[in-house]
Amino acid sequence: MAASILIADDYEDNLELLRLLLVAAGYQVIESRNGAECLKLAKQIQPDLIMVDLSMPVLDGWELFRALRADELTASILCIAVTAHGDADRDRALQAGFNAYLSKPFRGAELLKTVAGLLSPTQAASYAAETSLQ
């Protein structure tokens, strides 16, 4: 069964790009357009991974991440912080507990490598250690 990935992003072009890349790589993709919708979906479907845009309406990515970690249903879901602010938020996101960080615009190969690294049980721990050192 394909891993499920929930994308939280308020920008339609980002959703479409992520969906196309991830579906082509064999993942099941669910979309949400704000943090509140993502939180609701995360509790309902408990995806394998959530890609969180840090700047969203209703509930931003930081608040969404805190809410996910505070709920036992969603606390262990892998989360990737995604932002257009470049590397300015990288250290903050990784220190907050995000499993990985990607800046927009995405490079397809980097995105897929990050996702595969997190979803592979044998690579997840070493990948998390590598990315937090960068």
Image (cartoon, rainbow, N blue to C red):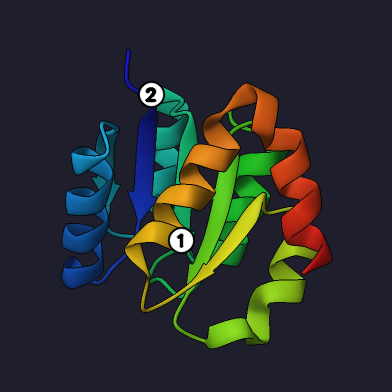
Query: In front here: 28 or 7?
Result: 28
Q: Quadrant of the C terminus?
A: bottom right
Q: Quadrant of residue 107?
A: bottom left
Relative to residue 120, is residue 14 drawn left or right? left
Q: Looking at the image, which residue sits at the far front?
A: 109
Q: Amino acid at mark 2?
A: Ile
Query: In front here: 59 or 79?
Result: 79
Relative to residue 75, is residue 46 drawn left or right? left
Instruction: Using the image, determine if residue 132 lies above or below residue 116.
Output: below
Q: What residue is at 26 percent from the left and 38 percent from the top?
A: 29
Looking at the picture, how far across and down is residue 30, in whole percent?
26, 39
Q: Amino acid at mark 1?
A: Glu
Instruction: Using the image, determine if residue 87 lies above or below residue 52.
Output: below
Looking at the picture, how far across and down is residue 61, in whole percent?
53, 64
Q: Which mark is residue 74?
A: none
Looking at the picture, how far across and down is residue 81, in whole percent?
55, 61
Q: Which residue is mark 2?
A: 45
Disc nearer the start of the sequence (1/2): 2
Q: What residue is at 44 percent from the left and 34 percent from the top?
A: 42
Q: Which residue is mark 1?
A: 110
Front label number (1 vs 2):
1
Q: What residue is at 57 percent from the left and 28 percent from the top?
A: 120
Element carrying mark 1: helix
Q: Residues within 10 Å of mark 2 (few under 14, many from 20)?
A: few
Query: In front here: 100 or 53?
Result: 100
Q: Residues within 10 Å of mark 1 (few under 14, many from 20)?
A: few
Looking at the picture, how far across and down is residue 32, in whole percent?
29, 50
Q: What residue is at 27 percent from the left and 58 percent from the top?
A: 33
Mark 1 → mark 2, Cα distance in angstroms: 26 Å
